[in-house]
Structure formats: C-alpha cells, structure tokens
C-alpha cells in the first residue's frame, strides 16, 4: 500500500511499540513486509505482539526490552539489533497534566529524557547507516500541542515542540542523502496516554484512532517534513499561528485548567 520496502528497505525499528500508536505502526509496517524490531519496557507484551506479527504477516521480528529513560539505552539497542535499520519510528514518550509546581519533578525530568534526549541519541546512532545506504526514513512523534503553548502540560508541550523542530531541521540536512524525516503531530488519540498522564479534560475535537495517525504518517513520509493528523487538529495549529500570543496563552490556560487548579 505504501511501498515501504521498495522506498526504504527491509527493517523498521519502533520505540514504544507495546501499545497505542507504536503497536499500530508495527502492524502497518509488518503488513508492508518489513521485518520489525520492537522496543519498549514490557517484554511479555512485546513477545506476544512479535508472535502475532510473525504468524499474520510472515515477517521476522526482534524484541528488545529496555527502559529508554535510562542512560545508555540507545547503546543497548545498537548492541542488540540483528539487522540494519532502514526505518526508525521514534514513538516512545509520555505526558503529564496539572499545575507544574505540583507535579513530580523526577517525572518531568524523565519525560524530557525519554521524549527528547533518547530521540536524539537513537537517531544519531542509526542515521549514519541510512546515509551510507543512500536511503532511509525517520519519523519523530511530535504533537498538535507542539504548535501552541499548552498551560498545565508545559513540559510535554515543550518536549513535543523540540521533536518537531528537531525533525524539521534534520530533514533539511539529510534530504540530499535520500533520507526522509517526518515530524508527526497527532492530536487527542485513542491510546493509553490519557490514563498515564491523568488527563481528564473532555476535548471539543473528536478523538482520532491510532490507525488514522499511522495512515497519515506513512502517506506523508517522503512528501512532507511535518504533518498534523486530522482536519480539526490542523485547524488548531493554524489558530495557534494566527492568534495573538498573549491571548492564545490566556485562552489555553482557561481551556486546559484542571478542575482542582487554583483560579
């Protein structure tokens, strides 16, 4: 459907592959005939998914169970991979929600490590081989909130803005090597994110599915440097660019304020 093996090669590595968007990427790329390296913490879940992909799509899989927050995680991955990686999906990440001053600073710092530092580290490790082969693809999970300041999700919003600009900037460096880089910006998506972030706000925009997000990504890779999934999320990004900054911050602070937050 997307001609991924013809465009990029035989092997994709996906971080955060145990659930949500990462799991859907694994299924979509296996359906394309790519061998899949699954990376996440939950080894039992990854093993189950690996067996399903092998049986359903007749591809080879490898499971690497590692905590990506820990220093040196990318070296563990590089020392473990069985095949050269042609397509990297930097999907692993998490968010938090609430008044910044009340949040656990260790969780906030670990978020920066996972959402930002590990993306840089693993991309840096895998990119040289793509350049050598004169083809490859890299997808970095940003977010619609990378386009707008997001009170009560300050660290998460900033980390996703980092990912978007990192991907955009890297795309400009490596395009002439025939390596495609995409910043993928989903909005509210059906996944474990809400539960993990303790996010209980009801959004006026309908939730998208992980299948929607992955289809947007694979349809856009090689054609765009950045893509926002869903028409309502695209409008939100445009709104963020056109609305005066001070008013935008105030509007979002009111919209996103937790029920128990001080007025």
Image (spheres, rainbow, N blue to C red):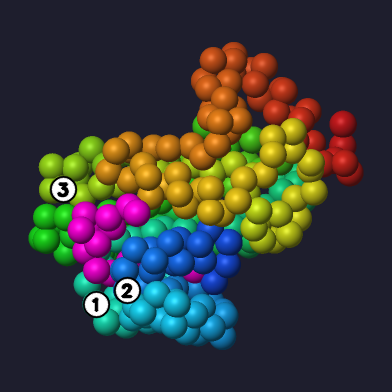
Sort mark 1 into few (<14), some (14-19) or many (20+) by Cα contacts within 10 Å: some
Residue picked out by circle 1: 83
| Magenta stretch: includes residue 15 | yes
Q: Indicate the position of residue 133 as horizontal and vertical percent values.
A: 11, 61
The residue closer to the viewer here, 262 or 149, is 149
Say which quarter of the image contains residue 132: bottom left
Identify the residue at horizontal 73%, vertical 59% (top origin): 195
Residue 130 located left or right of residue 62: left
Query: Which stretch appears magenta?
Result: 1-17
Q: Helix, strand, or loop for circle 1?
A: loop
Q: Helix, strand, or loop for circle 2?
A: strand
Q: Helix, strand, or loop for circle 3?
A: loop
Whether residue 224 is visible to the viewer of this picture, yes or no, is yes
Tell me, for residue 37, which label it has, or none. Answer: none
Identify the residue at horizontal 54%, vertical 15% (top origin): 242
| Magenta stretch: includes residue 81 | no
Tell me, for residue 178, which label it has, or none. Answer: 3
Residue picked out by circle 2: 35
Q: Indicate the position of residue 227 as horizontal and vertical percent values.
A: 43, 37
Considering only order in the chain, which callout, 3 or 1, is on the residue closer to the N terminus?
Answer: 1
Say which quarter of the image contains residue 246: top right
Q: CA distance from mark 2 to mark 1?
A: 9 Å
Say which quarter of the image contains residue 230: top right
Q: CA distance from mark 2 to mark 3?
A: 21 Å
Residue 6 located left or right of residue 236: left
Q: CA distance from mark 1 to mark 3?
A: 20 Å
Q: Is mark 2 in CB contact (under 8 Å) with mark 1?
A: yes
Identify the residue at horizontal 69%, vertical 35% (top origin): 205
Name above or below for residue 198 compared with residue 235: below
């Amino acid at each position: 459907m997307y001609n991924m093996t013809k465009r990029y090669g035989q092997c994709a590595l996906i971080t955060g592959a145990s659930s949500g968007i990462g799991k859907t990427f694994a299924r979509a790329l296996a359906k394309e005939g790519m061998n899949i390296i699954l990376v996440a913490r939950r080894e039992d879940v990854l093993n189950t998914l690996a067996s399903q992909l092998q049986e359903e799509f007749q591809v080879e899989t490898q499971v690497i169970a590692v905590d990506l927050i820990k220093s040196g995680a990318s070296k563990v991955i590089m020392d473990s991979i069985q095949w050269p990686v042609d397509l990297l999906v930097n999907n692993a990440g998490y968010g938090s929600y609430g008044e910044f001053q009340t949040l656990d600073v260790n969780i906030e710092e670990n978020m920066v490590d996972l959402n930002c530092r590990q993306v840089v580290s693993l991309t840096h490790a895998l990119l040289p081989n793509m350049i050598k082969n004169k083809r490859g693809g890299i997808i970095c999970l940003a977010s619609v909130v990378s386009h707008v300041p997001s009170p009560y999700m300050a660290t998460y919003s900033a980390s996703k803005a980092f990912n978007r600009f990192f991907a955009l900037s890297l795309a400009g460096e490596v395009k002439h090597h025939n390596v495609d880089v995409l910043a993928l910006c989903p909005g509210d998506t059906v996944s474990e994110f809400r539960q993990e972030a303790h996010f209980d706000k009801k959004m006026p925009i309908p939730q998208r599915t992980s299948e929607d997000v992955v289809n947007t990504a694979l349809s856009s890779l090689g054609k765009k440097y950045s893509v926002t999934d869903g028409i309502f999320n695209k409008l939100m990004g445009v709104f963020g660019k056109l609305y005066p900054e001070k008013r935008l911050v105030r509007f979002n602070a009111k919209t996103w304020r937790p029920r128990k937050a001080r007025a």
